[in-house]
Image (spheres, coloured by chain):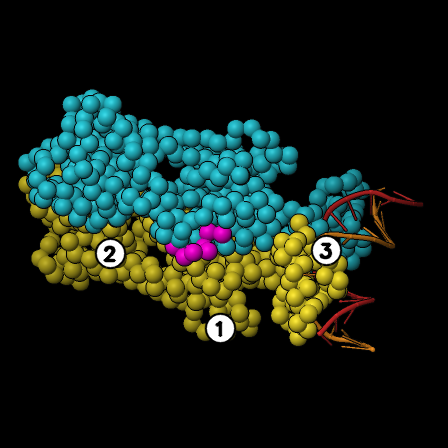
Chain colours: A yellow, B cyan, C orange, D red
DNA sequence: CTGAAAGCGCTTACAG
DNA sequence: CTGAAAGCGCTTACAG
């Protein structure tokens, strides 16, 4: 690859002049400019961004840390597309790092990105994975503090990180659902929860129970069942629920996949019953599933935009103000 | 951020010694090693990889270029996860860049990655987008040649790029389906195709027709319809097909989404008929759709592994041998 | 085993 | 308007 020196020699000028022509950072006589551009063309010269970065102390890169095995694939895709668009608009390139169930995985991902001199990082938390890898908020915030770039956390808030975070109110989510169901006259509302070892499942359960309570419906533990997160898991959980013979008339599921599995079990085992099913995520596929599945539409687009805003605002503003940075989103009911 | 000089001062040694301790590139006396590591710890020093890259002429980064609006979201997710794992295993970080329907988008994506000194690039082609942005193979191969790093192309082959590519045989795909259907006794096999302006649609159509021919079934143009790629599009295309009243008994669809939409139309409009439906991609959701949809399972895992092999093999081997690098995959039928 | 020096490819004050 | 020099933070031959 040609360097700036090669170009300068060919054009018969100093390297600094080439730099200035290419960056438009000074007035250059028309004749030298032409000669320089000519030489650039001939040599097919492209500036080495690594050298540029070292000199300027800025890499024009941002990073995103993503959990593996996300239940909603489409979320990853849209998050990535949005963040990448935003990055490109700011003329930055996007690094991507995954973390998984292994112990040090989330911290290492952040450190790798930081070592590559990213200017900012988005960390997407996943409570399910976080339970498996023993996510340690203290260790996490220590790392965030030790590196010197903004880290926006998605779906988790770290107080020591100035609450630079975008959250979903998981409690309100299920609360909205039971509220809706109770007011529509449903009383026996079953709930297929995620494993209750996870915070997120606990919050959702809390919303479910408090929604019932507000409508004077007693919580019946027999209507509650824990499940893993895939379609098959929902299918089996619902089978089990049905076998308890408590005659539920509505069913709230932790996510759309579980709901799809549950719908299948209902279709096969108790097709004569009309059961109102709720999922979470509002996967477009739901329009094509029988029996119908209502869902919660998470404001992905808005929340992602918020993440992006927070990130770039904090990259540009070195003097981070301690204002309220935390943004919380709730989903909307989509009834089918 | 602390630099290597800060560390060396604190430890009372030369910067080169710090470098050697950290890289294990020479024998160091136990006492200096301890002092250096101590200083590293105290200052929370992390080497600046940008400086290291400039010096070593290697950035430990690879890049991937992905089309926006992929029909199969889960493919993006798995491709990214696999490539990222491989990258991490090779101790490399992954850049991601998207291209879209705008004219210069794919070339620019590659150039951006190259300017950031990636050591290798994976380019994932999409024929549908390629039609919209007037993908120009000549321009593309010119760029690939002008940059000096290996570019592995996925789902397209560029001869001037040493055919460093992983392909799907789209023709064989539909050929397999019609072959199967004909031998199972189906004669009126409808086909919801993608827009025939795209190469990929033409290949699939070719496979469809030749499969029929081999089984002495005449191609009936009334059984063919063009469609866009989403669920709704499949729904409408199938409606139209049904309104033609040609009594098709089997239906081959360009992808799973179209098939899902078509299945809905069939469920609603002609529920009494038993129609054998085929999609493409074998989305796991198909197990939960009525009426059943068979599909083609693309060997994603294997093909991605092949991409990764080609990429890292060519990053490490500077003297690219002109051996057969092209790998072609065909999908398998999954009957439901 | 360790230090001093040179250099990776840029940019940018400083001169003129 | 342009050049010469210094320096970003590393690594690595070269000495000793």
Residue B313 figure quarter: top right
Q: Which residue is mark 2?
A: A296
Q: Which residue is mark 1?
A: A322
Q: Earlier in the sequence, mark 3 or mark 1?
A: 3
Q: CA distance from mark 2 to mark 3?
A: 59 Å
Which type of secondary structure does the marked residue at label 1 adopt?
loop
Chain for numbered disc 3: A
Residue D16 figure quarter: top right
> Can residue A210 be seen by looking at this rendering?
no
Is the residue at mark 2 from the same chain as the one at mark 1?
yes
Is the residue at mark 2 from the same chain as the one at mark 3?
yes
Q: Earlier in the sequence, mark 2 or mark 1?
A: 2
Q: What x and y, as percent, mark residue A218?
A: 15, 54
Chain for numbered disc 2: A
Which type of secondary structure does the marked residue at label 3 adopt?
helix
Magenta-tinted stretch: B101-107
Q: Is residue B26 left or right of residue B192?
A: right
* Magenta stretch holds residue B106: yes
Q: Earlier in the sequence, mark 2 or mark 3?
A: 3
> Can residue B124 be seen by looking at this rendering?
yes
Residue located at (53% from left, 66% from top)? A315
Q: Which residue is mark 3?
A: A6
Image position of B210 with respect to A193: above or below: above
Residue located at (49% from left, 64% from top)? A90
Residue located at (65% from left, 46% from top)? B58
């Amino acid at each position: 690859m040609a360097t700036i020196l090669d170009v300068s020699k060919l054009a018969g000028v100093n390297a600094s002049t080439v730099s200035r022509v290419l960056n438009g950072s000074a007035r250059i006589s028309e004749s030298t400019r032409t000669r320089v551009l000519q030489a650039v063309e001939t040599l097919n010269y492209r500036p080495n961004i690594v050298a540029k970065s070292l000199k300027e102390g800025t890499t024009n890169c941002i990073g995103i840390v993503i959990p593996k095995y996300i239940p909603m694939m489409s979320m990853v895709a849209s998050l990535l597309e949005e963040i990448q668009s935003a990055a490109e608009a700011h003329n930055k390139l996007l690094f991507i790092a995954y973390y998984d169930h292994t112990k040090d995985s989330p911290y290492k991902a952040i450190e790798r990105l930081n070592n590559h001199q990213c200017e900012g990082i988005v960390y997407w938390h996943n409570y399910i994975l976080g339970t498996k890898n023993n996510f340690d908020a203290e260790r996490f915030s220590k790392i965030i503090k030790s590196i010197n770039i903004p880290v926006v956390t998605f779906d988790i808030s770290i107080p020591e990180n100035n609450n630079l975070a975008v959250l979903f109110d998981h409690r309100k989510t299920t609360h909205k659902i039971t509220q809706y169901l109770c007011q529509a006259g449903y009383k026996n509302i079953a709930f297929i929860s995620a494993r209750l070892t996870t915070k997120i499942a606990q919050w959702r359960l809390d919303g479910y129970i408090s929604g019932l309570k507000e409508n004077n419906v007693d919580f019946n533990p027999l209507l509650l069942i824990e499940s893993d997160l895939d379609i098959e898991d929902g299918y089996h959980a619902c089978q089990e629920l049905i076998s308890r013979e408590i005659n539920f008339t509505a069913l709230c599921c932790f996510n759309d996949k579980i709901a799809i599995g549950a719908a299948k079990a209902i279709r096969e085992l108790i097709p004569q019953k009309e059961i109102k099913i709720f999922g979470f995520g509002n996967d477009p596929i739901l329009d094509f599933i029988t029996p119908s599945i209502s869902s919660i539409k998470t404001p992905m687009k808005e929340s992602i935009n918020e993440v992006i805003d927070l990130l770039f605002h904090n990259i540009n503003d070195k003097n981070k103000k301690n204002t309220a940075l935390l943004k919380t989103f709730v989903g909307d009911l989509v009834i089918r």
